[in-house]
Image (cartoon, rainbow, N blue to C red):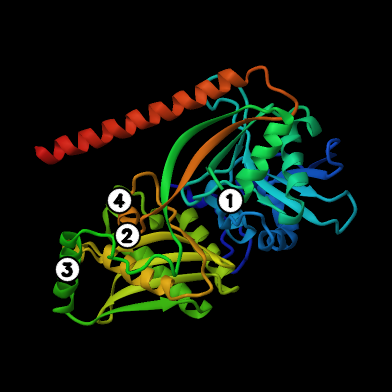
């Protein structure tokens, strides 16, 4: 739980910050990439509000959209998760007003594997489902090349980078692969998994791919709920209603198992303020929606969806455990999926689900492959084989711990 004393309470501010973070890292550094001529700067995340407007403009023309690295999301996220995070900004040149071509938030842990072998690690936190840098689509090759040359521009930086949660296919993956081939840079992949996604309009009826038994069970659950009152989907997108809908969402989470475990968002003042900030920022632009499944006037499940143009991220679901036997979360996903399928402005929706999460895999059969990528940077890395091996072993250890926890829970259930 985050210490509330460390928080600066500025509820109306768009870019809130923690006093603790204000002195976390050093000042802005600048340099010119010799390979591309582009201007690079590295600044603390808490100072990145100075480029917020051009950063937001870059997000609209990004090669691959990533809501989690947009300023409306990333700057509020610094409150609970921003210690030590820095932002690499890539500009066309050093002149005032030069176009911003790339943004990459990263950390620089010295002991990722328990040894003093540094790495530039793309920013990853529990609310971020993608680590793809924001890159100008029209100058993508130059911008990605500058990123790969960052440790030549700033020689004190490590010679390797870790990009988390990168799709195995897509525009960014294609540009990166081409440059890695041209520069003969090595890569190792870890933390591989696939994630459910939705192509609205092509998905068909949400229950169509399920077994007849599963469809029958879900319909029975819906009928049981209907006996207590009408079931409706209520969608909130206006700024005035979002604050109240977010409070309802948070209240549901606090009442559930996460609340009992102390991991619900309301258990942390910093995470609560972060969610309020994101909802305010995106809500003011019409880019967030909270969907509520109502039983009469009572909300029994709630979910949050973020948007950037034709892309969306179905990021969070909470539900009232009093109705758990009738699967309110599943009933909500079915209705939200129907609404997304009917929205002609949507072309891709990321489920944001963690590996092997059963709910979204059940209803969205399409899959995108995701992996963490350990990448050798352009100045060369004599220690890359060791770093890659350590990262892969770290992934295996995490898998074994996950399997052990699952086995222990199963055993307790039997007992």
* Position of residue 311 measured from the top left corner of the image (x, y, whole percent): 54, 63
Circle 3 Cα neighbour tier, 10 Å, few/some/many (<14 / 14–19 / ≥20): some
Distance of mark 3 from mark 1, alpha carbons?
Answer: 41 Å
Frontmost of labels 3 and 2 is 2
Marks 2 & 4, CB-CB < 8 Å contact = no
Most foreground residue, 242 or 199: 199
Marks 4 & 1, CB-CB < 8 Å contact = no
Residue 221's disc is 3
The image shows residue 58, relative to residue 281, as above or below, that is: above
Frontmost of labels 3 and 1 is 3
Marks 3 & 2, CB-CB < 8 Å contact = no
In the image, what residue occupies the spot 44% across and 70% down?
A: 201
Whichever of callouts 4 and 1 sits on the residue coming sooner in the sequence is: 1
Most foreground residue, 316 or 61: 61
Q: Which residue is mark 4?
A: 358
Element type where label 2 sits in the image: helix
Frontmost of labels 2 and 1 is 2
Whichever of callouts 3 and 4 sits on the residue coming sooner in the sequence is: 3
Examine the rendering and report whether any part of residue 361 can be seen. yes
Examine the rendering and report whether any part of residue 326 can be seen. no
Q: Which residue is mark 2?
A: 363
Element type where label 4 sits in the image: helix
Whichever of callouts 2 and 4 sits on the residue coming sooner in the sequence is: 4
**Which image quadrant is residue 144 in?**
top right
Distance of mark 2 from mark 1, alpha carbons?
Answer: 33 Å
Q: Which residue is mark 1?
A: 78
């Amino acid at each position: 739980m985050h210490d509330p004393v460390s928080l600066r309470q500025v509820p109306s501010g768009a870019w809130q910050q923690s006093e603790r973070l204000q002195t976390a890292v050093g000042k802005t550094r600048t340099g010119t990439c010799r390979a591309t001529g582009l201007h690079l700067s590295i600044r603390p995340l808490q100072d990145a509000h100075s480029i917020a407007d051009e950063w937001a403009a870059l997000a609209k023309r990004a090669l691959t959209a990533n809501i989690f690295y947009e300023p409306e999301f990333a700057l509020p996220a610094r409150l609970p998760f921003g210690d030590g995070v820095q932002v690499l900004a890539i500009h066309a040149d050093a002149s005032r007003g030069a176009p911003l071509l790339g943004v990459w938030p990263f950390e620089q842990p010295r002991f990722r594997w328990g040894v003093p072998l540094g790495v530039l690690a793309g920013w990853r936190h529990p609310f971020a489902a993608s680590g793809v840098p924001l890159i100008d689509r029209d100058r993508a090759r130059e911008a990605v090349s500058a990123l790969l040359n960052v440790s030549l521009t700033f020689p004190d930086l490590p010679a390797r980078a870790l990009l988390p949660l990168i799709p195995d296919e897509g525009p960014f993956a294609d540009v990166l692969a081409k440059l890695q081939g041209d520069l003969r840079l090595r890569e190792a992949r870890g933390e591989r998994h696939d994630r459910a996604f939705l192509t609205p309009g092509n998905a068909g009826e949400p229950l169509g791919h399920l077994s007849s038994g599963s469809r029958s069970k879900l319909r029975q659950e819906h009928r049981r709920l209907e006996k207590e009152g009408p079931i409706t989907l209520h969608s909130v997108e206006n700024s005035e209603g979002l604050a109240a809908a977010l409070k309802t969402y948070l209240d549901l989470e606090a009442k559930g198992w996460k609340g009992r475990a102390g991991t619900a968002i309301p258990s942390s003042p910093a995470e609560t303020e972060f969610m309020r900030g994101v909802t305010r920022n995106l809500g003011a632009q019409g880019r967030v929606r909270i969907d509520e499944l109502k039983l009469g006037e009572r909300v029994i499940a709630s979910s949050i969806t973020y948007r950037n143009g034709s892309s969306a991220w179905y990021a969070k679901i909470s539900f009232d455990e009093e109705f758990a036997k009738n699967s309110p979360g599943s009933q909500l996903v079915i209705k939200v999926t129907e609404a997304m399928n009917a929205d002609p402005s949507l072309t891709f929706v990321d489920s944001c689900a963690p590996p092997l999460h059963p709910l979204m895999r059940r209803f969205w059969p399409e899959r995108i492959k995701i992996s963490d990528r350990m990448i050798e940077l352009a100045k060369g890395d004599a220690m890359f084989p060791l770093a890659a091996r350590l990262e892969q072993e770290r992934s295996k250890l995490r898998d074994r711990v996950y399997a052990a926890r699952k086995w222990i829970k199963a055993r307790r259930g039997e007992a």
